[in-house]
Image: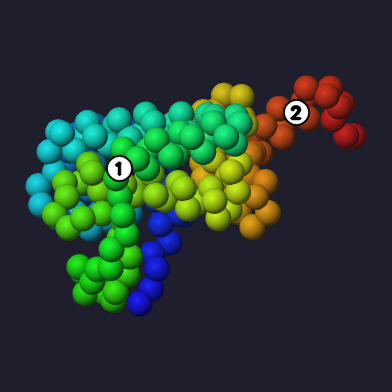
Amino acid sequence: MHLNPYGEDAVNLAADLANRRPADAGELADRCRAAGVAVEGPVTPDDLDRVGAALDAWEKVVDATAEHERAALVNAMLAAAAAHPRMTNHVGTGWHLHYRDDGQPLGAVVSSLISVGTALHLAGRGMHRLGRCAATECTTIFADTSRTGRQRYCSHPCANRDAVRRHRARGVPPAG
């Protein structure tokens, strides 16, 4: 039996979906499949709405500044998802844990994944490990999965642009 890495995979999926919200149910299904989520059954506009509501709640977790507030928001998400662990071998790749009942619509599955994954990510890696890019012009959400736990930017290009901006703001004359 193996344990799914719900924390990292789920928060990365949440960040991806929150940063670029799916336009329709088909796009939601495609992006979930690409992230490794088993999509069983048809995906409907109701699923898109449920995921949208879960992402709205998740963004409040991301933007919370105090640990107790962040924990309370995650706990509310967990209660709304009403997810519980169960062993499954639904795709024939080996027994593993899922935090959902069989046959749930995709919206409920993604809501459970995001809430449980966020709880595992924050409890396992640190309550500060979700954020928005520190670059002034960027609001991209990221899940800090770095070894050091000090990620401040969504990407290397944003970190480099911000470093150049800070350098120029100091008014250091060019070498030469």
Whole-percent x, y for residue 172 in the image: 86, 27
Could you tell me which residue is drawn at 72 percent across and 35 percent down? 163
Looking at the image, residue 158 lies above or below residue 38? above
Residue at 45% of width from left, 33% of height from top?
A: 73
Q: Looking at the image, is mark 2 or mark 1 nearer the viewer?
A: 1
At 24% from the left and 34% from the top, the residue drawn is 50
Q: Position of residue 64 (x, y in %)?
A: 54, 29
Foreground pick, 163 / 61 = 61
Q: Residue furthest left?
A: 42
The image position of residue 62, as x and y in percent, is 50, 34
Question: If the image is split into quadrants, where does the N terminus sit?
Answer: bottom left
Residue at image mark 2: 166
Checking the image for residue 125, the label placed there is none
Residue highlighted by disc 1? 81
Left or right of 128? Residue 43 is: left
Q: Are marks 2 and 1 in contact (CB under 8 Å)?
A: no
> In this rendering, does residue 22 appear at all?
no
Say which element carries label 1: helix
What amino acid type is highlighted by mark number 2?
Answer: Arg
In the image, residue 6 above or below residue 131 = below
Question: Is there any visible trace of residue 168 in the rendered image?
Answer: yes
Q: Which of the pair 85/20 is nearer the observer?
A: 85
* Label 2: which secondary element: helix
Q: Quadrant of residue 37?
A: bottom left
